[in-house]
Image: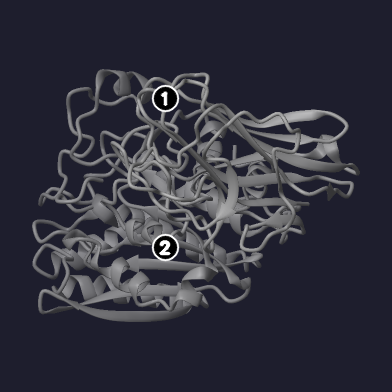
Amino acid sequence: MPLTWRKGMRSAIVAACTTLALAMAGVLPAGPAQAAAPPDISLANVKAHLTQLQSIATANGGNRAHGRPGYLASANYVRDQLNAAGFTTTLQSFTYNGATGYNVIADWPGGDPNDILMIGAHLDSVTAGPGINDNGSGSASILETALEVSRQALQPAKHLRFAWWGAEELGLRGSQFYVNNLPAAERARIKGYLNFDMVGSPNAGYFVYDGDNSDGTGAGPGPAGSAALERTIQDYFTSIGVPTRGTDFDGRSDYGPFIAVGIPAGGTFTGAEGIKSSAQATLWGGTAGQAFDVCYHRSCDTTANINDTALNRNADAIAYAVWTIATAVPPVVVWQDTFETATGWTVNPGGTDTATLGLWERGDPEATTSSGAKQLGTTVSGTNDLVTGRLAGAAAGDYDLDGGVTSIQSPPITLPTGTLNLSFSWYLAHGSNASSADYLRVRVVGSTTTTVLNQAGAATNRNGAWGSTTASLNAFAGQTVRILIDAADASGASLVEAGVDDVRITR
């Protein structure tokens, strides 16, 4: 993990519950998972890989850094293991700072080639040391997970692709090269990326990337689908009684190039040079007032610098996520709308709206800013979304929602029987002159009415950022329903903007 970038009971029942949650989010297919439960990854095997990486560093000047012989030897070790296990591997070369770097890309045969799950970790160290926690720990853990895929002859619904990145310590150079050189059609086939950078820190914390921005700090949520990846990993740690905390998508590790092009991401992190607080020591044990990894970017980052318990738990979490996400049956899409064409949504369906400006419409939104992003000019997919007044105007408040409530309703949707899930992306943005009377609300209307989202405003600045919501529609199975969306500016002169995109119902 680079210093200059700001960066932590596998039972069939738990796996099945997680699969359902992911399916509701549209990241995972809805349907029964395969019978095989996620495996218990051998800690001894993971540590054996770390011993090999340590030996490589020792024989090559004490490190495995970009452009140094220890890095290429590390890449060849990983590739040889994967080739022997039946993966199709590529040693992708790139140049940075006048030196050749390498990414190891390994594809497991089978699975839907248009639905790829990637799992990655950086393989390089800094020049100061062998980099066994940073990031031999992540590299060895995903390597052993990949080898277990082979041992079990796993036949996932998704196509599995593992990656070991070069030159991460110099600014994510390997992963950036990979993503930037993928054709757009190939990028679109990658439906999720899981990143594991430092998962055995000696004074460990248990951090999970904050896909839904529930912490409300830093960079905001990841692309739609990231929240579901976060929940999958949280479910594993909950099942073994280990509490987790969020860590921000701040661009510090190799997920950065993926989320920059809209690919959902997730992963774990056990801490780097940050100091463990007293509250965190109470939560997880360890030493308060001391770094999570006192040997971060130092020569002492050796095989002695590993917390076996943290490494074991995180390796098992990786396997849990891979098995849970990749082995579900593809969904049946009952109904969806990406708003690229008109499908019959009705503005002010009840004839009672009071808003005078910024009414809901389908269109290509223009970006506005006022103390940060307010109306988003980018959609989740395609060109159009549902937006409260798509124009920007000379000032941020020229076309924002004003005067009260605006609503829009979908055409009738006939639902089949069975298990049904609704997912959609949304944002609500407002200025500090807003209040709890302002809101974005989404309801499903059938024989009864259910509210699936009710986001209230507050007297604080809230910037626009796409989030995602999922809900079960089982109570409406066999009915004809409509989706009703309203937004309100009920605080006088407050600045309010809202958007909705990619509404989907799956079975």
Which residue is nearer to you in this view: 408 or 453? 408
Residue situated furthest front in the rendering: 356
User: Which label is found at residue 501?
Assistant: none
Q: Choose between 138 and 113: the one closer to the eye.
A: 113
Image x and y of residue 138, in percent: 35, 54
Q: Position of residue 158 (x, y in %)?
A: 61, 65
Residue under label 1: 493
The mark that comes first in sequence, 2 or 1, is: 2
Question: What colouring method underlies this structural image?
Answer: one colour
In the image, residue 371 lies at what x, y percent?
A: 28, 36
The answer to whether residue 34 is visible is no
Residue at horizontal 76%, vertical 33%? 350
Callout 1: SS: loop
Label 2 SS? helix
Camera-near label (2 vs 1) is 1
Q: How many marks?
A: 2
Q: Residue at x 78, y 45 (%)?
A: 420
On screen, residue 495 versus residue 189, left or right, reads left
- 164 with respect to 333 (left or right): left
Separation (CA) of disc 2 from disc 1 = 56 Å
Crowdedness near tag 1: few (<14), some (14–19) or many (≥20) residues, C-alpha within 10 Å? some
Q: Is 456 situated left or right of 43 in this image?
A: right
Label 1 amino acid?
Ala
Q: Amino acid at mark 2?
A: Leu
Q: Which residue is mark 2?
A: 143
The spot of residue 191 in percent (x, y) is 53, 62
Disc 2 + disc 1, Cβ < 8 Å: no
Q: Residue at the location (55% across, 58% down)?
A: 384
